[in-house]
Image: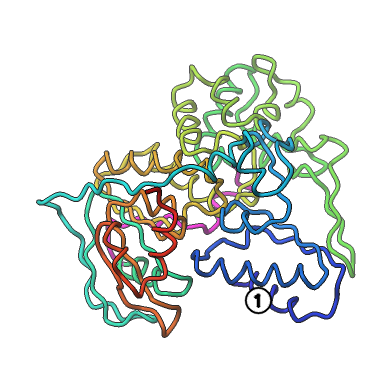
Amino acid sequence: ESQRIKLIRHLNSPLTDLVYIIDEPSVGLHPADIEKINEIMLNIRDKGNTVIIVEHDPDVIKIADHVIDIGPGAGKHGGQITFEGSYAQLKQSDTDTARALTRQHHLKQSAIRDNQAWLHLEHLQHNNLQDVSVAIPKNAQTVVTGVAGSGKSSLIKGGFAKHEDAILIDQKGVHTSNRPNLLTYTGIFDDVREFFSKATGLKKSMFSYNSDGACPNCNGKGVLKTELAFMPDFSQVCEVCGGTRYRPEVLEAKVDGYSIADVLALTVEEGLSLFQTHDAIAQTLSALQSTGLGYMTLGQSLDTLSGGEVQRLKLTRYMIEPVTEKIFIFDEPTTGLHEDDIPILQARFDQLIEEGHTVILIEHNITMMTRADWLIDVGPGAGNQGGRILYSGPPAGLKNVAESRTAPHLFGSLSE
C-alpha cells in the first residue's frame, strides 16, 4: 500500500527522464489490483521515464518492454544473466522463468471427504466483515482469496485469534537474541559452538561473537559505524577482524580446515555436507533445505530476510519439533518467491497435511489457488465494498460466481 501511494505521487509529478526502481510491486496484491498498478507504471513510463521492476509475478513480467532474467539458481548458484530480451522471446528461452511462465495450470482434485471434519467460524463482524460465518475443512488445504482489503485477514486471523490450536506464520521479523542469525533462531548455534569447542579445546564461549570470542575492535559486529550529523551513518568493515566478528585466536582454531567464521559463511546446503554426521545439526539444516532456504548462509542476519523467507524459516521450527493436529495459518507465503520455487513450498504444506494438520493460506497467487482442496473468496471489493463470503467450496465451483473478481483470473489461467 505504501508503494502504491508513492507511485501515485510520482504519477502526478511533472519531472521526466527519471529512473524508477520498484521492488516487487505485486506483493500483497490480488490479480485484479495488479492490473491497476500495471497501468500506473506504464503511465510513468509513457511520461518519458525509465521504470525498472524487480518482480516474480507473471502478470507484471508480461507488461515489460525488456526482460532481464538472473540465475540460474539462488545464492552462490545464481548471479548470472541467463536471458535478456522481450517477453515473447523469454517464453521461448530455456530458463526456469520461461518454464514457470509456460507451465500449464490444472485444478487439484479436491480431497474433501463425505465424513469430513470441519472448523466453524460464526457471526464474525469485526473490521469490515458483515456478520459472516464459514466452515473450513480439517486436515486439508484451504486458500482464502479476494482483492486487497476485502477482509481475508480479518476473517482468518480474527476468527482464529483465540483458537488454542492455531499457529499463525506471518511475515513479521523474528528477534530471538542479540544480532540473531539462521543458527541462533533454529537453536543449533550452541551445537555448532560445542562441536568447535570439543575439537579445538577452546571454551565454547570463545565461538560466540556476542561473548568472549568477539573482536575487541568492533565488539563482534564486523563493521564500525560512524555517525554523521546531517547524513546517514557511515559503515565500514572492521580492519582488525576483516568483518569476521571474531578474535584472531578464534579464527586460527579450525576443524576440517574451517574456522567458525568460515562455517558462518557457508550456505545451508554446504553446511549439510560438513555436519552430515552430527544428527541434531544435520536435521535442522535438512529442514531449512526442504523449505527452499538452502541458498542462505548460516550466519545470515535475520534482518536481511524477505517476508516469504521469514515465513519459511518459522515453518522450519515446526518441522524440527513436531506438533500434533494444529491449524497452520500462512499470510501470503509466496511473497518473494519465484514461480519455480512454489512447488518446494507446496511440498511442505502437503507434508503438514499428511501429518494430520490443517493448512489455511491467505493468498493471491494463482498457482497456490489451483492447489487448494477448498477455496473461500471474500469480497467483492475492498473496505465497505467487501467483507462478504462470496464463495466457499471446491475451487471448480468459483467459476459460477459472477461477483467474484478472483474467478476470471483463476479460470483464465487454466489449461483446457
Residue 178 falls left or right of residue 360 = right
- At 75% across and 71% down in the image, what residue appears? 44
Q: Nearer the viewer, residue 361 or 67?
A: 67
Nearer to us in this view, 256 or 65? 65
- Amino acid type at image mark 1: Ile
**Residue 236 position within the rendered picture, expressed as x and y whole percent measured from the top left:** 86, 47
Q: Is residue 131 above or below residue 24?
A: below
Residue 329: horizontal and vertical position, in percent? 37, 56
Seen in the image, is 85 located left or right of residue 151? right
- Which residue lies most toward the top here? 256
Instruction: For the N terminus, give its image quadrant.
Output: bottom right
| Magenta residue span | 162-181
**What predominant SS class does the magenta segment belong to?**
loop
- Quadrant of res 232: bottom right
Residue 203 is one of the magenta-drawn residues: no
Q: Is residue 126 above or below residue 241?
A: below
In percent of width and height, residue 252 lies at 76, 21
Residue receiving disc 1: 5
Which residue is drawn at the image coordinates 43% and 42% (left, top)? 317
* Quadrant assignment, res 241: top right
Within 10 Å of disc 1 (Cα), the crowding (few <14, some 14-19, many 20+) is few
Looking at the image, which is closer to me, 355 or 219?
A: 355
Q: Is residue 370 left or right of residue 309?
A: left
